[in-house]
Amino acid sequence: MRIVRAVVLLALCGCAGAQNSRNALEEANEAFAKSLRWSDLRGVVQRVVSDRQPEFLRLVASAEENLKVTDYELEDVQAGSDKAIVHSRVSWYREPSMVAKTERMSILWERKGGSWLIASILGGPLPLPPRR
């Protein structure tokens, strides 16, 4: 009977750890979406893995002043223990144009040191291609 209790307790602890990781991912993605909506590219860059931040800054340098995001909608989350892919739809335009684009965006998140950080972004206004 003790063995059964120990196995159940370990399973419950594992589920709690997975739920905490999922909550941390949701919080990181929510902060990313908020920064994106407010065109706070400095806030977005803080969510990118440190070794890719200089590359990301180069890619988005011209976007900070004229990027306007009008909508961000979460579609799907596929999460593992240390990697996750978040699929969303984002609507945006670059001034002076007023024509909005709506695209699917996929973000690869990696868990590093207990934090979820962006490793790559496919689609949307701020692409960060996967590492080669």
Image: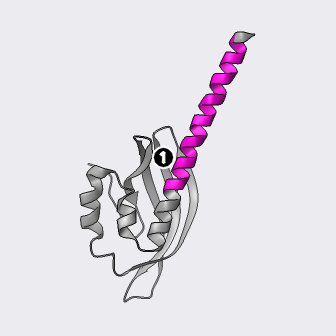
The type of colouring in the image is one colour
Give the class, few, some or many, for how many residues have Cα within 10 Å of label 1's Cα (few <14, many ≥20): many
Is the stretch drawn in magenta largely helix, strand or loop? helix
Task: Tell me if residue 126 can be seen.
Answer: no
- Figure quadrant of residue 59: bottom left
Q: How many marks?
A: 1
* Residue 13 magenta: yes
x and y, in percent, of residue 119 in the image: 36, 51
* Residue 48 magenta: no
- Figure quadrant of residue 110: top left
Which residue in the rendered view is the most extreme toward the right? 1
Q: Is residue 8 left or right of residue 51?
A: right
Question: Is 39 located above or below residue 130 in the figure?
Answer: below
Task: Tell me if residue 23 can be seen.
Answer: yes
Residue positioned 28% across, 54% down in the render: 52
Q: Is residue 107 left or right of residue 11?
A: left
Q: What residue would you read off at disc 1?
A: 84
* Quadrant containing the N terminus in the rendered view: top right
Residue positioned 43% across, 80% down in the render: 93
Between 32 and 59, the one lying in front of the other is: 32
Residue positioned 62% across, 29% down in the render: 13
x and y, in percent, of residue 48 in the image: 36, 55
Q: Mark 1: which secondary structure?
A: strand
x and y, in percent, of residue 79 in the image: 53, 44
- The residue type indicated by label 1 comes to Ala
Residue range in magenta is 3-28
Residue positioned 53% across, 48% down in the render: 24
